[in-house]
Amino acid sequence: MTTTPTAQAVPLPAPHSSGCPFAPPPAYTEAAATGPMTRADLPDGSSCWLATGYAEVRTVLSDRRFSADVRHPAFPLLVPGSRETLVTDNPSFLRLDDPEHARQRRMVTGDFLVKRVAALRPDIQRIVDEALDRMTEGRTEADLVTEFALPVPSLVICLLLGVPYEDRDRFQFLSRTLLSRESTMEQLKAARDEVLEYLRTLAARKREQPEDDILSRLAVRDDLTLDEIASTGVLLLIAGHETTANMISLSTALLLEQPEQIARLADPAALPGAVEELLRLLTIVHTGLPRVALEDVELGGVTVRAGEGVIAMVSTANRDEEVFGGPDRRPTDELDLERDARRHMAFGFGVHQCLGQPLARAELQIALETLFRRLPGLRLAVTQGEREFRTESFIYGMRSLPVTW
Amino acid sequence: MQVSVDRDRCCSSGMCVMNAPAVFDQDDRDSLVMLRQAVVQPEQFEDVRLAAELCPSGAITVTEDGAAGTGA
């Protein structure tokens, strides 16, 4: 018999509040307050589970009885009708299970090793410094999103992939189209087709003339098709671009509200921990991570039946008082750069956990430290109410952040 | 304390290297987890426990042992 929880089903995706712009949609935190597992309604009218507790989210994302395979007929979809697009287009390994997931993921992990990312730090520092040079030259005001937060990770991932400089503006546009909930199905498909075709062509070129970049290393292998390389390239491009960009702009906006905490970024010993706390609190995947149960699983006081969808809500899990609270700490819905936030799941958990996380951490540490060091007078150029947030996107973030210095 | 790693489960997240860099490394050839040292020192116990807890693919096993850490 299926356990029936008393709480009302949560509509997915739930709208953001007009209150705190850094908080996940209130419907999710309210669901979390009623218990770790709640029923939820998907846009196509079907229903699924919402996992909001820390332990339950951890289990959904790491227990192999939960599948990430988008081709499963019961896989929960946040965009109605997107199954066909996702399935026919050679799903990226983000949406596949092992062993196929591991086979494809292992082809790119070498470029994201902790030591390789450490060696990239001078390149990242140069990209950050040059972006700030361009943003501040002859000016006292700029939009931090378009002039700093978006270009930095875009240039870093293009450098890693080996995308030529002249193609990068087009890539940024296509990436945003692919991630926006406002895009129509036709726009999504057109953008995805264009990126895939571009990457197939570029990979074919690099197969003939390999360079020192990820696409070349994939292209010279004889066990990968150009389609698989292009699909992996799209995943890395999207995963490495908007996510880090929105973390940079949201972190900046939040820190400008709490300037007394900014000094901690200048302490090299405290900087990594400060970035972990920003990752925890801001957890930009506000829509959660979808999975489907392959077997019946007892979880958080309910039975998730085989064939039922589950959305793992990392944003609420990352605000669990038992895991992240403490007598000397601020409440977990507030920023506290002295908190030990290392247990956060902002990068997910399980075998699909973000493979670019060492790169993301390095970019965030370097970008935020450099920004506030070089522009100590940084402040908003608009009122707080005029800041624009991206509530329509799978990756939460900011549309614009006008600043002056 | 004894620590062992299961390279078949490793998904190369790098969490272990971040949390206990003296104990864990990533193999240059296949990106999978490697142990830097056979014996864990007592001052490393806490880092190693955290690395095991936060390994996303469950590739690290820690066996607590009352006499561990004194054999080096």
Image (tube, grey):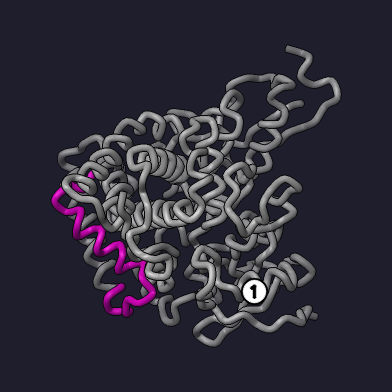
Horizontal placement of A248 versus A50: left or right?
left
Magenta stretch: residue A164 in it?
Answer: yes
Q: Is there any visible trace of residue A219 in the rendered image?
A: no
In which chain is the residue bearing label 1? A
| Classed neighbour count for the residue bearing mark 1: other residues with Cα under 10 Å, few (<14), some (14–19), many (≥20) | many
Q: Taking A181 as reference, is A236 above or below it?
A: above
Q: Residue at x 40, y 35 (%)?
A: A117
Residue in the foreground of this view, choosing between A105 and A5 = A5
Q: Residue pushed farthest left?
A: A166
Residue in the foreground of this view, choosing between B47 and A132 = A132
Horizontal placement of A207 versus A274: left or right?
left
Residue span colored magenta: A162-188
The residue indicated by pointer 1 is A49
Q: Position of residue A159 (x, y in %)?
A: 26, 42
Q: Residue pushed farthest bottom?
A: A45
Q: Position of residue A129 (x, y in %)?
A: 27, 38
Q: Residue at x 25, y 59 (%)?
A: A172
Q: Taking A41 as reference, is A354 above or below it?
A: above
Q: What's under tag 1, amino acid-wise?
A: Trp
Q: Taking A43 as reference, is A199 above or below it?
A: above
Q: Position of residue A163 (x, y in %)?
A: 21, 48
**Quarter of the image holding residue A338?**
top right
- Quadrant of the frame with the N terminus of chain A: bottom right
